[in-house]
């Protein structure tokens, strides 16, 4: 064993005293241990010169013992560790203050072929030695580092994919929502044109009203775009204190843009209980409700005059539920199982994004969205929202 020549494996090996056999045995055991160690073991003196270099160190750094013995340990280090080492050593020898002894650090090693690799280095001082000696135990952590980097990269990919997918889902929802104000703008513009072309009466007031409505719808369309921006940036910041009853009334008015709603009586049964206001994104909640109203109207297309009920009730002190109840064709089993799946639609012009987007919105608000058959026919679509979310958000901040 080459290490037998080195100071740590005492010279007494060659002495012919009566202790020769036990010392020989001890050295043999030590050498066996050094060779069996999976970690690289390197002993240096106070100047940083290598005095011991076990088999694992030879394999790890691709040097033979002869190539490194007596040389400075810096040869096994890349920059910046190489430049820092002398300073660490002399500062420890002068002050006894250590940055590494007994702690262990992730640093880098350098092989004889110049390849750098990550190592975990722990250092101890050889206390009973005749001269200053330090032992370094080095573990090659290339594999762990590779796994760590791969795990980090796949986490980043996943986050990116989920960001893209939620943006994709949102984009489809935005297209769906943009369609409504745009078709309303087109109808009001056509009506204004007809009014202006009429020579029989002064329609100025009616045109002004129509233009006001065009403005409202254009603002609504740009709100939808703003919502996309805010969604992508930071959703929580969008929340504000919302008066749900006013929001429901506003939404019904918006729904009237689709004139088919005028074929039905809209019955509002809203809770007047004085409970805490909701903290919600009003445009998003409106989007959910509008889709439910439009779905109800779609389901009652051939049932002129059939009423649509919008109902709200506090399920508890801090959970409000809003339901839209129609008496339309209802849902068969296949539809019931699929309505929250993106792009599931039974309508010719449907996109199948209304309910999936609504689900995303309601879940983001900490609420639930669900449906049940209505008696004698039709559906009840409901969502619940927690009112105390305002406090939760404050705690989160
Ligand atoms: N009140 C309802 N009564 C009967 N079926 C309904 C009702 N609401 C939703 N559905 C069914 O669920 C499907 C999905 O609804 P969703 O709102 O997600 O999409 P859509 O209305 O088809 O299209 P859009 O993207 O324009 O909303 C509908 O196509 C319809 O089959
Ligand atoms: Mg819909």
Image (spheres, rainbow, N blue to C red):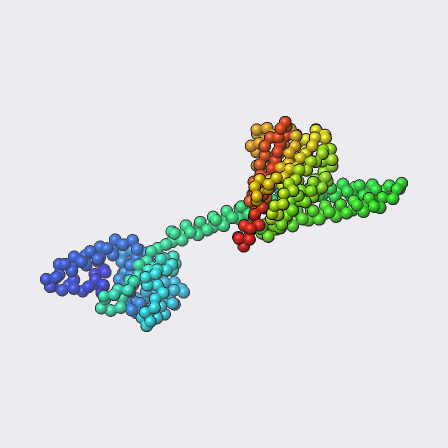
**Between residues 219 and 373, which one lies in front from this camera angle?**
373
Left/right of residue 375 with respect to residue 15 in the rendered view: right
Q: Residue 277's x, y, as percent? A: 62, 47
Task: Specify whether residue 111 is in view.
Answer: no
**Residue found at x 72% / y 30%:** 304
Tell me where residue 270 sits by quadrant.
top right
- 240 or 27: nearer the viewer: 240
Quadrant of the image for the N terminus? Answer: bottom left
Rendered location of residue 72, percent (x, y): 31, 66
Query: Can residue 324 be seen by looking at this rendering?
Result: yes
Q: Residue furthest front?
A: 274
In this rendering, position of residue 25 left or right of residue 166: left
Q: Is residue 256 above or below residue 89?
A: above
What residue appears at the point 28 percent right and 64 percent down from the top-left corner? 125
Name the residue rendered at 65%, 42% in the picture.
272
How far across and down, in percent of the image, does residue 221 sit? 69, 46
Q: Nearer the viewer, residue 150 or 202?
A: 202
From the viewer's perspective, is residue 147 above or below residue 125?
above
Q: Check the image and name the residue furthest to the right.
A: 200
Q: Residue at x 16, y 60 (%)?
A: 23
Q: Residue reaching furthest top?
A: 376
Give the camera-side residue of 70 and 194. 194
Residue 63, position in %: x, y?
Answer: 31, 59
């Amino acid at each position: 064993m080459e290490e037998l020549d080195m100071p740590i494996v005492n010279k007494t090996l060659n002495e012919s005293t009566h202790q020769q056999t036990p010392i020989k045995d001890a050295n043999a055991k030590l050498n066996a241990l050094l060779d069996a160690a999976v970690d690289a073991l390197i002993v240096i003196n106070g100047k940083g010169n290598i005095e011991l270099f076990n088999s694992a160190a030879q394999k790890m750094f691709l040097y033979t013992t002869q190539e490194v013995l007596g040389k400075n340990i810096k040869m096994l280090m890349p920059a910046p560790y190489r430049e820092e080492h002398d300073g660490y050593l002399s500062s420890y020898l002068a002050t006894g203050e250590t940055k590494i002894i007994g702690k262990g650090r992730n640093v880098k090693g350098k092989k004889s072929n110049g390849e750098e690799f990550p190592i975990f280095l722990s250092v101890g001082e050889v206390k009973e030695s005749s001269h200053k000696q330090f032992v370094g135990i080095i573990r090659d952590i290339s594999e762990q580092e590779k796994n760590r980097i791969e795990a980090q990269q796949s986490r980043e990919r996943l986050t990116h994919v989920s960001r893209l997918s939620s943006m994709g889902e949102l984009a489809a929802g935005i297209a769906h929502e943009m369609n409504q104000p745009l078709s309303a703008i087109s109808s009001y513009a056509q009506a204004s044109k007809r009014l202006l072309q009429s020579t029989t009466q002064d329609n100025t007031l009616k045109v002004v009203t129509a233009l006001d409505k065009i403005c409202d719808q254009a603002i609504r369309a740009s709100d939808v775009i703003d919502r996309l921006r805010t969604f992508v940036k930071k959703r929580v910041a969008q929340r504000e204190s919302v008066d749900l009853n006013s929001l429901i009334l506003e939404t019904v008015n918006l729904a009237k843009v689709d004139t088919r709603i005028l074929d039905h009586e809209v019955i509002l049964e809203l809770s007047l209980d004085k409970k805490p206001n909701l903290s919600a994104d009003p445009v998003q909640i409106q989007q959910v409700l509008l889709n439910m109203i439009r779905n109800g109207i779609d389901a009652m297309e051939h049932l002129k005059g059939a009423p649509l009920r919008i109902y709200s009730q506090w399920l508890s002190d801090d959970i409000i539920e809003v339901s839209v109840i129609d008496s339309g064709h209802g849902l068969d089993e296949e539809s019931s199982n699929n309505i929250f799946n993106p792009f599931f639609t039974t309508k010719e012009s449907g996109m199948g994004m209304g309910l999936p987007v609504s689900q995303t919105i309601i879940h983001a608000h900490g609420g639930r969205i669900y449906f049940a058959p209505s008696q004698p026919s039709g559906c009840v679509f409901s969502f619940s929202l927690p009112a105390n979310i305002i406090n939760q958000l404050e705690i989160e901040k």
